[in-house]
Image: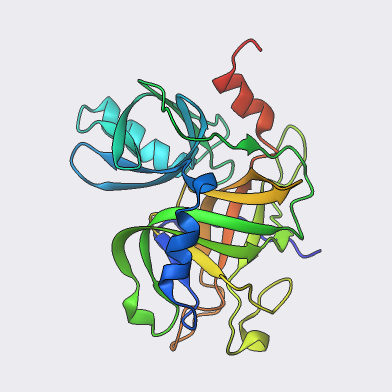
Amino acid sequence: MKKYLLLLCLPLVMAGIFRDDVNEREYLKLAKEPQFDCVGRIVSSTGKRGGSCTLIKEDYVLTAGHIALFKDEKVRSGETEIFIEFNEEKYAVAEIFIHPYFHIDSIRTDLAVLRLCHPVKGIAIPKLNQSLQEVGNIGYGVGFGASGPAKPRGLVEFYDKKIAGMNMIDTLSENRDPDTGAFLAFWTDFDSPHDPDSCNIMGDKEPLPLEYTPTGGDSGGGMFIIKNDEYLLAGVCSSSGYDKLRAEDRYGTSAGWMRVSVYYDWIQSIINPGA
């Protein structure tokens, strides 16, 4: 199995670039399914976009470390307040927990947990995936930010839409957790319906019906897999890379997702201390 290095490509991670031969409304429809209500948007009191997150307990959300680090600096300086938005309702952030191994220069261990001032009601909270067997599963990625069709390239902009799409989880990163030795992330790629042979980077070359790739604003959003007819939170959007720079479209990109299974114990230590 080919492994991928988790690269620092922060400016490239937005809400979702989708197949140009599929109507956008299909991706919007998927994002509105109730199992994805748990994916929220991070916003600041100044109105700036801040990425995506997933509700993992009534008063906690999981997101990417590089998003939380930036926001934490702004909060400490008194420059801004941070809110999580679910269904257009905002919840203030009370506390930020960034994984101790996270470092912005390497983007490894790119995870953070945010505690909210008040609990979120009326939204189903997903179970966290604990299995290390993510590869080979279909992942459902959800997030906010820039969106648009893969072709032509110039149509991808920030429309503040919640987009959900599908990817096959193809492989694992080369980077390992220093404590357990487990691979930190899994990777997906954006397969083309027009030119699958030249666009494929890893795994199966055939695109899924709602194939997509995350881009800026999607960072911190969740990727879900289905086990026993239940959606489990398996990944957190961390980074993306233009592996095959194509002038005519945006196919041939890849995305790295931090593995919830590897960090399950750390997450539990924050949201259920002493349990």
Q: Which of 234 and 28 is in front in this view?
A: 28
Residue 78 pos. (x, y %): 21, 27
Tell me if 265 is positioned left or right of 111 in this view.
right
Name which residue lies at 70% across and 38% down.
Answer: 262
Vertical placement of residue 198 versus 18, above or below: below
Residue 104 pos. (x, y %): 47, 44
Find the residue positioned furthest to the top.
274
* Residue 218 in sight in this render: no
Residue 274 pos. (x, y %): 63, 10
Name which residue lies at 72% across and 48% down.
Answer: 229
Tell me if 193 is positioned left or right of 85 in this view.
right
* Residue 254 in sight in this render: yes
**Snapshot quadrant of residue 91:** top left
Q: Nearer the viewer, residue 228 or 177?
A: 228
**Snapshot quadrant of residue 182:** top right
Q: Assign the C terminus to one quadrant of the image.
A: top right
Name which residue lies at 61% across and 20% down.
Answer: 269
**Snapshot quadrant of residue 137:** bottom right
Q: Assign the N terminus to one quadrant of the image.
A: bottom right
Q: Which of 23 and 137 is in front in this view?
A: 23
Q: Which colour scheme is used?
A: rainbow
Name which residue lies at 51% across and 72% down.
Answer: 242
Vertical placement of residue 95 versus 83, above or below: above
Vertical placement of residue 133 versus 211, above or below: above
Residue 56 pos. (x, y %): 54, 32
Q: How many marks?
A: 0
Q: Which of 51 and 245 is in front in this view?
A: 51
